[in-house]
Image (spheres, rainbow, N blue to C red):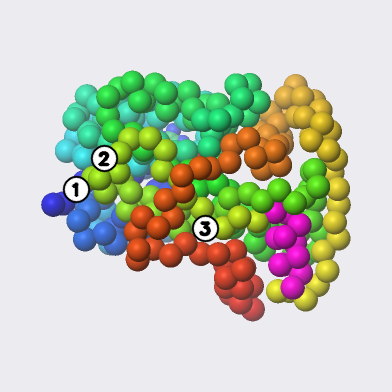
C-alpha cells in the first residue's frame, strides 16, 4: 500500500540522501517541505528529486499555514533539519503539531547521532534540544521513531575535521582507543527510508552502526591506506576536555557542542545499544575500511 512521506530538510547533506532513498521505494510518495529562496546550489540539489517525482511544498518550520498545507494527506514525517533550538525544538514541535492536527501517523525527528537520550542535562546542548523536542513529540500520541546511528563515518574520512589527511595528523582526547559507533551518511539515509515506511517498527529508538572505530584505529587505517604516517597529537585527559567545555560554554557555544561530541565519544556515555543492523537482509552496512578505500579511490 502506498504511503506518503513528508520530508523536511531535503536540501541538506543527509536529507538529500534520505529523499533519494525514499523516492527509490516502490511504495512511497514523497513530498518535500523546503524553505523558499536559496542559492542555485539548493535548486540544483532539488532538481533530481523533483524529476524523480517528489512534490514540493514551500515553507519554513515557523510558518503554521505552510505546515498545515504540507502535512495534509501525509502518513509519516521524516525530519532531517539542522539548526539551533528555534529549529530543533520550536520548529520540529510546530511540524509535529501540524502533523497531529492533520492525522499523520508517525514522525521521525532529526536525531541521527549517538544515544542523545543518555546525555546529561546541560552538558551537550545539541543532544539536550533533541531529547527535549522528542519528549514533547512523544506526548502528542503519534508513533515516533528515533534514528540513532552514531557518528557519521564520513567524519573520519578524507576532509575530516577529526583526522587531517593532508597534514597527516590525528588529534584526540583521552587515550584515543575508545571505539565509537560510526555509520556512513549513505547507509543512514538508506535505513531511515526503510524504517520510515516499515509499519512493523515500534515507537522508540532505532539504533544501528556500520562499524566501531577509535581515533587511533582510524588513523592507523588511514595511514595504511594512504601510505603516509599520521602524527598523534594528544589534546588532554577527560578532565582537560571538561575544563575546555566549561570555558567554551561562556565564550563559544558552538565550540562547546563540538567538545561535548568528543566527550561522549571518549567516555561512551551515549553509546548505542540494541543495534538493529540486520533488520533488513538486503541492507549490508558499510565497514570503515571499505568506506575509506572507496573514498580514497574516488579521490584518485
Ligand atoms: N552523527 C553525526 O555525525 C552527524 C553529523 C552531521 C549531521 N548530523 C545530523 O543529521 C541531521 C541533518 O544534518 P545535516 O548536516 O544534513 O544538515 P544540513 O546539511 O545543515 O541541512 C539542514 C536542512 O534543514 C533545513 N532547515 C533548517 N532550518 C529550517 C527551517 N526553519 N525550515 C525548514 N527547513 C529548515 C535546511 O534548509 P535550507 O536549505 O533552506 O537551509 C536544510 O535542508 C541533523 O540532525 C544533524 O545533527 C549528524
Quadrant for residue 294, please give it.
bottom right
Height in image: 58 above or below 155?
Answer: above
Height in image: 235 above or below 298?
Answer: above
Q: Residues within 10 Å of mark 2 (few under 14, many from 20)?
A: many
Residue 293 left/right relative to 108: right
Q: CA distance from mark 3 to mark 1?
A: 28 Å
Q: CA distance from mark 3 to mark 2?
A: 26 Å
The secondary structure type at the circle numbered 2 is strand
Question: Is residue 18 visible to the viewer in this orientation of the structure?
Answer: no
In x, y percent, where is residue 203? 33, 35
The secondary structure type at the circle numbered 3 is loop
Earlier sequence position, callout 3 versus callout 1: 1
- The residue at the point 51 percent across, 53 percent down is 209
Please tell me whether mark 3 or mark 1 is closer to you in this view: 3
Q: Mark 2 sits on what residue?
A: 76
For the C terminus, the quadrant is bottom right
Q: Mark 1 sits on what residue?
A: 3
Is residue 99 found inside the magenta-colored segment of the image? Answer: no
Cβ of mark 3 under 8 A from ligand 1: no
Viewer-side residue, 195 vs 186: 195
Q: Mark 3 sits on what residue?
A: 210
The secondary structure type at the circle numbered 1 is strand
Q: Are marks 2 and 1 in contact (CB under 8 Å)?
A: yes
Q: Residue furthest left?
A: 1
Earlier sequence position, callout 3 versus callout 2: 2
- The residue at the point 57 percent across, 67 percent down is 291
Q: Residues within 10 Å of mark 3 (few under 14, many from 20)?
A: many
Please tell me whether mark 3 or mark 2 is closer to you in this view: 3
- The residue at the point 50 percent across, 48 percent down is 149
Q: CA distance from mark 2 to mark 1?
A: 8 Å
- Magenta residue span: 214-224
Question: Is residue 152 visible to the viewer in this orientation of the structure?
Answer: yes
Amino acid at each position: 500500500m502506498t504511503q506518503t512521506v513528508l520530508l523536511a530538510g531535503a536540501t541538506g547533506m543527509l536529507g538529500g540522501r534520505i529523499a533519494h532513498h525514499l523516492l527509490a521505494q516502490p511504495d512511497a510518495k514523497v513530498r518535500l517541505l523546503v524553505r523558499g529562496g536559496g542559492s542555485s546550489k539548493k535548486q540544483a540539489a532539488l532538481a533530481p528529486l523533483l524529476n524523480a517525482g517528489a512534490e514540493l511544498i514551500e515553507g519554513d518550520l515557523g510558518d503554521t499555514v505552510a505546515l498545515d498545507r504540507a502535512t495534509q494527506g501525509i502518513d509519516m514525517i521524516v525530519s532531517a533539519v539542522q539548526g539551533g533550538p528555534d529549529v530543533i525544538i520550536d520548529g520540529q514541535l510546530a511540524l509535529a503539531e501540524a502533523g497531529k492536527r492533520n492525522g499523520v501517523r508517525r514522525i521521525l525527528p532529526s536525531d541521527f547521532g549517538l544515544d542523545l537520550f543518555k546525555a546529561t542535562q546541560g552538558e551537550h546542548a545539541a543532544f539536550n534540544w533533541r531529547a527535549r523536542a522528542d519528549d514533547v513529540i512523544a506526548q502528542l500520541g503519534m508513533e515516533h521513531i528515533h534514528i540513532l546511528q552514531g557518528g557519521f563515518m564520513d567524519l573520519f574520512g578524507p576532509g575530516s575535521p577529526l583526522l587531517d589527511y593532508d597534514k597527516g595528523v590525528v588529534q584526540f582526547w583521552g587515550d584515543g582507543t575508545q571505539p565509537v559507533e560510526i555509520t556512513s551518511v549513505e547507509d543512514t539515509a538508506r535505513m531511515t527510508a526503510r524504517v520510515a515506511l516499515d509499519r512493523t517498527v515500534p515507537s522508540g529508538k532505532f539504533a544501528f552502526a556500520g562499524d566501531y572505530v577509535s581515533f587511533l584505529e582510524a588513523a592507523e587505517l588511514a595511514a595504511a591506506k594512504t601510505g603516509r604516517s599520521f602524527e598523534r597529537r594528544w589534546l588532554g585527559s577527560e578532565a582537560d576536555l571538561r575544563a575546555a567545555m566549561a570555558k567554551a560554554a561562556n565564550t563559544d557555544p558552538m565550540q562547546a557542542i563540538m567538545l561535548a561530541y568528543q566527550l561522549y565519544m571518549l567516555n561512551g556515555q551515549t553509546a548505542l545499544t540494541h543495534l538493529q543492523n540486520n533488520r533488513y537482509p538486503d541492507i549490508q552496512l558499510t565497514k570503515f575500511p571499505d568506506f575509506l578505500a572507496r573514498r580514497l579511490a574516488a579521490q584518485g
